[in-house]
Image: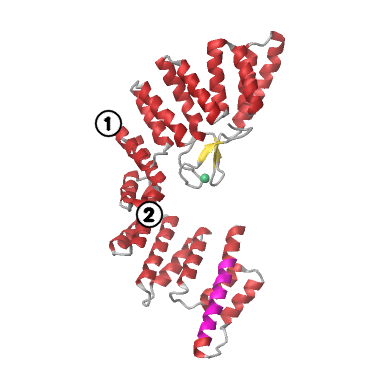
Amino acid sequence: MLESALALLLIAIAIAVGWLLGRFQERKSSRQHNPPNRDYYHGLGSLIDNKADDAVESFIKALEVNTDTIPAYLALADLFRKKGEYDRAIEMHQTLLARTDLLRDDFLRIQLSLAKDYIAVGLLERAEALLQSIITDNPRDHQRHIARRQLAKLYENQQDWDQALKTALTLPDSKRTEIAHEMAQYACELALQAEDAAVEGLLKQALRLDPTCVRASLMWAEHRMSKYAWRGAVKHLKEVMSQDMKRVPETLPLLGQCFSELGNPDAYADYLERCANLCPSTSVFMEKARLIEWESGTTLAADYMVDALRKHPSLKGFDYLVALKLQESAPDERDRLKILKELTGQLIQSKPKYQCQQCGYSSQQLYWQCPSCKTWNSTHLIQGLEGE
Ligand SMILES: [Zn+2]
């Protein structure tokens, strides 16, 4: 809210400065001394009184529409849209479009901005028709790319992943790179809905578009696991280490199952050792302790967890240590440890596991697209004492 008010004020100042410069140029060329109109003085007064909304209204009235002032109008409309004042933004764009003296470039810029209003307010069919007409209207490359990008985003909002991907694929390579991670997510969404035979092709496409797409590797591994192809699944799960080290904990439950099916706990222990060195996390230490417990008993597993917690303290690791201690506790200690375990368990349940790095939205489950800010791949496991 404060940011919007500040932005509104800055735009008002920008308009005032622009207006003054315009008048300065005008005077220089014509040597005329026309005083500013009433709206200008009213706007200046509102600006001094810190009434940004009033100031903007007055400057809009005072401002002549021409090629130089259109960016200021578009910035204002943008701000209205961001503040949720969609009607105002649409009205401003439509008023501008009704002018007959607009340059073609300005006309298309205003149309692109109007399409954003339509999307924001949910008039998706109207937005789609407008963007399609811009694309077929032979605009400059730059504007065509913006229109296609917006159109892909519109299909994404409608969860029409096929159209979103097809539209994004019409962009040239240089523009595609900027949104490759989003396109890979569209392919993953399609893979979720696809028939069994088409799944791997779509996941392959996702990884071709974005080789760092962890979701595609995880999905591919799960798909291989559903066919009992454990080695193939391990290959895809291990790829995550080079894609995004912070995502390695997501792979461990699946890797544990694969290595167990393959009857090769030593290979799993080696891999966990590598993870502990390269990307230490509580999940890695807990998984390693589980293997130690299975092979050498609870006491050694608990000793290992104590060491790990000294270097890498976390609530989750402590909870697991208490569980280990509970197993080997004497009867007189057991009740106290049970209470402690209950408390740590409740604390963990009450804390979110994931957080969006864009907007801070937190949740117990992993979302590939943040439900709050709609950013892709921004939700990660929380790090530190209350997380990994
Ligand atoms: Zn978010």
Which numbered dot is residue 345?
Answer: none
* Residue 174 appears anywhere in the view: yes
Magenta segment range?
A: 9-27
Residue drawn 56% across the image and 83% down it: 37
Quadrant of the drawing holding the N terminus:
bottom right
Q: Position of residue 272 (x, y in %)?
A: 51, 23
Q: Is residue 271 left or right of residue 217?
A: right
Disc 1 residue type? Ala
Label 2 Cα neighbours within 10 Å, binned few <14 / some 14-19 / many ≥20: many
Residue 14 is inside the magenta segment = yes
Residue receiving disc 1 = 197
Above/below status of 171 relative to 237: below
Most foreground residue, 134 or 294? 294
Most foreground residue, 116 or 169? 169
Q: Earlier in the sequence, mark 2 or mark 1?
A: 2
Give the Cα separation between the discs numbered 2 and 1.
30 Å
Disc 2 residue type? Arg
Residue drawn 36% across the image and 66% down it: 108
Above/below status of 369 relative to 20: above
Q: Position of residue 342 (x, y in %)?
A: 65, 22
Residue receiving disc 2 = 149
Q: Position of residue 291 (x, y in %)?
A: 53, 16
Quarter where residue 215 is shown: top left
Above/below status of 135 relative to 321: below
